[in-house]
Amino acid sequence: MAKIHTTAKKHFILVGNWKMNPDTLDDAKKLFSALSRKAQKMSKVSVVIAPPYPFIGPLAGKSEVISIAAQDVSNEPRGAFTGGVSARQAKAAGASATIIGHSERRKAGDTDEIIAQKTFEALDAGLRVILCVGEKERDQHAHYLRAIRDQILVVFSKIDKKKASWITIAYEPVWAIGKSYDTALKPSDIHEMSIYIKKVISEVLGQKPGLKFQVLYGGSVNFENAQAILSDGAIDGLLVGRQSLDPDAFGNMIEYANNL
Ligand code: PGA
C-alpha cells in the first residue's frame, strides 16, 4: 500500500474521487488498471483512488502503487444505522484512507460536528483522513476565511493531536466544484489559502508541524489547470473529481506531478 507522505523532494499526492461512478465493477476495474499501469512508473507521486463502497473490496490490493480511500464513513462506530458504512468496515474492505467533509456530504446534512465525529471514528479505525474544507462563496470582507478556520478547528478540537499527521486537508471552494474548468481557483489564490490553512493548523499543533501540514486543492481541476496549480499553488497535491474518471487526463496529471 502506498503511503500518503512527503519526502525532502516534493512528493505530490493525487486523489481521484470517483463519486457515484462508474456503473459496473467491470468498468471500475478497467479504469483502475489503466491508472495503476501509469502510476507504476511514477515513484514520486502517491496516488489514491476513492471508488464507491461496493468497489473498494474488489479493487483493494489490485495495485501496489494505488491506495484506496472510502468517499465517506459513518460518524457512528456500529449499530442500527441502515445504509451506513463504518470506518472499521471501510478499513476491513481494504481502504487505507477516507475522504470526510466533502461538500456533497455537507450538502446532504453533515454538520461540522458530524464531520468531527467521522474524523474521530476514521482515525480510531486506523484510516488516514482527507478532510475537505471550503467556503460556499467568497465575500468582500473575507468572512469566508473565518468559516474555513472554524471547519478546521472543530475537527482538531475533537481528535487526539498525536494522530493529526494522519490528516490531509483538501481545500475545495464549493463554488468551484463540478464547474467549468476555468472556474478553478488561480494558483496565486491557492497559494494564499494553503498558507492560511497551515497557519490555522499551526495554532493547534505548533508552527513546525503546522507549516509542514499537507494541503491539497480540489475543484474543477483538469490537466491544463493542474500544471499551473501544481507548479505555483504551493500545495501538496490535488483532489480530482470528473477528470479522475478519464485515465488519460488523470494519468497525465500523475506524470506531470512526478516530473516536477
Ligand atoms: P470536480 O470535483 O473535479 O469534478 O470539480 C472535485 C470534487 O468534488 O472533489
Image (cartoon, rainbow, N blue to C red):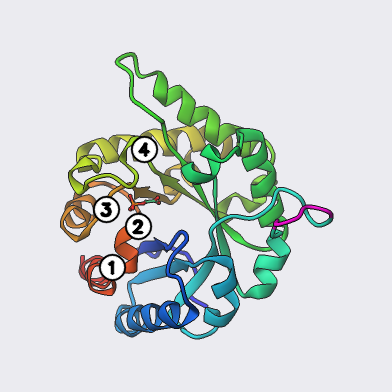
Q: Is residue 125 left or right of residue 250?
A: right
- Residue at 34%, 78% (x, y): give it: 35
Residue visible at 29% across and 74% down in the picture: 247
Q: Residues within 10 Å of mark 1 (few under 14, many from 20)?
A: many
- Whether the residues at callouts 1 and 4 have beta carbons within 8 Å, the answer is no
Q: Can residue 9 be spotted in the picture?
A: no
Prevailing secondary structure of the magenta residues: loop
Q: Nearer the viewer, residue 230 or 6?
A: 230
Q: Earlier in the sequence, mark 1 or mark 3?
A: 3
Asked if the residues shown at circle 2 and circle 1 are in contact, with their CB atoms under 8 angstroms apart, the answer is yes
Relative placement, left or right, of 170 versus 61 is left
Label 1: element kind: helix
- Name the residue beneath numbered marker 4: 173
77 lies left or right of 47: right
CB at disc 2 and ligand 1 closer than 8 Å: yes
Q: Residues within 10 Å of mark 4 (few under 14, many from 20)?
A: many
Check disc 1 and give the amino acid type: Phe
Q: Residue furthest right?
A: 79
Q: Is mark 3 within 8 Å of ligand 1?
A: yes
Q: Spatial distance from mark 2 to mark 1, Cα to Cα?
A: 8 Å
Q: Quadrant of residue 123?
A: bottom right
For the residues marked 1 and 4, what is the alpha-carbon distance in whole angstroms? 20 Å
Instruction: Tell me the residue that label 2 is attached to.
Output: 240
Magenta span covers which residues? 80-84
- Asked if marks 2 and 3 touch (Cβ < 8 Å), the reply is yes
Find disc 3 in the rendering and name its residue: 221
Residue 250 image label: 1
